[in-house]
């Protein structure tokens, strides 16, 4: 049950696009399409941004998109905005019927 | 409106016990898997445990197996986490979350802080 691997930090200027990677194994990310992404602002509870690799819940802006290739999933934020500055976590269902989160990525808007 | 409200956190000595509760409202509680997720101070999210709609299946992260027990009372729309043999490394904010489509945690509570210290 090792955490999925994410870059510690990613930054971009307003309007730019950034991509956060999430690397696991064939027992989690690579084996299932149950990959989700969460946004967490300081002192707040996480918020679901993407589910099932690439689906957005109602109310999430379409500048957030997800994808997956092999054992690596990705979250792309297009047209970066100041309010996107937050921590982002991926998660995946696993072959042990558990869930595992990523190590987390701090997104900074320059 | 979906609401999840955790309670029961606090300061406990190493080796002690604590029971967390999560009161759910605004949805049919008995129709959803439910989870506990924790976050140590300044650290990332860690999935702790989840439970099937009828309580017949429960899964745990290895670090809490044998010490923590997840349970639910569908008549009371409540989720619980019994934590025994607590360790300093269990110190964290504990969130309850509803598992929606594709096992995604689509709603979260505000969290309750558990501090294990002498």
Image (cartoon, coloured by chain):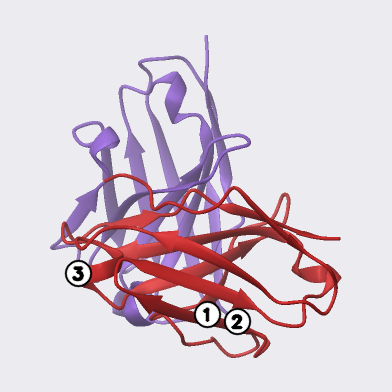
Instruction: Tell me, yes or no, whether dots 2 and 1 are on the same chain.
Output: yes
Q: Which of B72 and B108 is in front in this view?
A: B108
Q: Image height check: is B81 above or below A65? A: above
Residue at left 52%, top 9%?
B118
Could you tell me residue B110's position as x and y percent?
62, 56
Which subunit holds the residue at mark 1? Answer: B
Q: Earlier in the sequence, mark 2 or mark 1?
A: 2
Report helix, strand or loop for mark 1.
loop
Q: Image height check: is B73 above or below A60? A: above
Could you tell me residue B76's position as x and y percent?
38, 65
Alpha-carbon span between mark 3 and mark 1: 19 Å
Which subunit holds the residue at mark 3? Answer: B
Which subunit holds the residue at mark 2? Answer: B
Q: Image height check: is B49 above or below A48? A: above
Could you tell me residue B49's position as x and y percent?
31, 51
Q: Is residue B85 left or right of residue B20?
A: left
Residue at left 63%, top 36%?
B42
**Residue identified by numbered label 2:** B1
Q: The red chain is which one?
A: A
Q: Which of marks 3 and 1 is nearer the N terminus?
A: 1
**Residue identified by numbered label 1:** B26
**Residue identified by numbered label 3:** B54
Q: Which of B71 and A42 is in front in this view?
A: A42
Contact? badges 2 and 1 (CB < 8 Å): yes
Q: Is residue B63 left or right of residue A91?
A: left
Contact? badges 2 and 3 (CB < 8 Å): no
Alpha-carbon span between mark 2 and mark 1: 5 Å
Could you tell me residue A60's position as x and y percent?
64, 84
* Residue B105 seen in the current view: no
In the displayed image of the protein, which residue is found farthest to the top? B118
């Amino acid at each position: 049950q090792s955490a999925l691997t994410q870059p510690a930090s990613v930054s971009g200027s307003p309007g730019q696009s950034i991509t956060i990677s999430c690397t696991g194994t064939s027992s989690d990310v690579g084996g299932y399409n149950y990959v989700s992404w969460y946004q967490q602002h300081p002192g707040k509870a996480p918020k679901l941004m993407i589910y099932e690799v690439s689906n957005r819940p109602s109310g999430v802006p379409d500048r957030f998109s997800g994808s997956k290739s092999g054992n690596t999933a990705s979250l792309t934020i297009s047209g970066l905005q100041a309010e996107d500055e937050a921590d982002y976590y991926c998660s995946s269902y696993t072959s042990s019927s558990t869930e595992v989160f990523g190590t987390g990525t701090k997104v900074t808007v320059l | 409106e979906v609401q999840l409200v955790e309670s029961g956190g606090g300061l406990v000595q190493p080796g002690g016990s604590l029971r967390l509760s999560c009161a759910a409202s605004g949805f049919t509680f008995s129709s959803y898997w439910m989870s506990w997720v924790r976050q140590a101070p300044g650290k990332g999210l860690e999935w702790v445990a989840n439970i099937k709609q009828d309580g017949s299946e429960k899964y745990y992260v290895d670090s809490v197996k044998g010490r923590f027990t997840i349970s639910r009372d569908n008549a009371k729309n409540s989720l619980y986490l019994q934590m025994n043999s607590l360790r300093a490394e269990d110190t964290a904010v504990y969130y309850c979350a509803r598992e929606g489509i594709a096992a995604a945690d689509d709603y979260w509570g505000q969290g309750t802080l558990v501090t294990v210290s002498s």
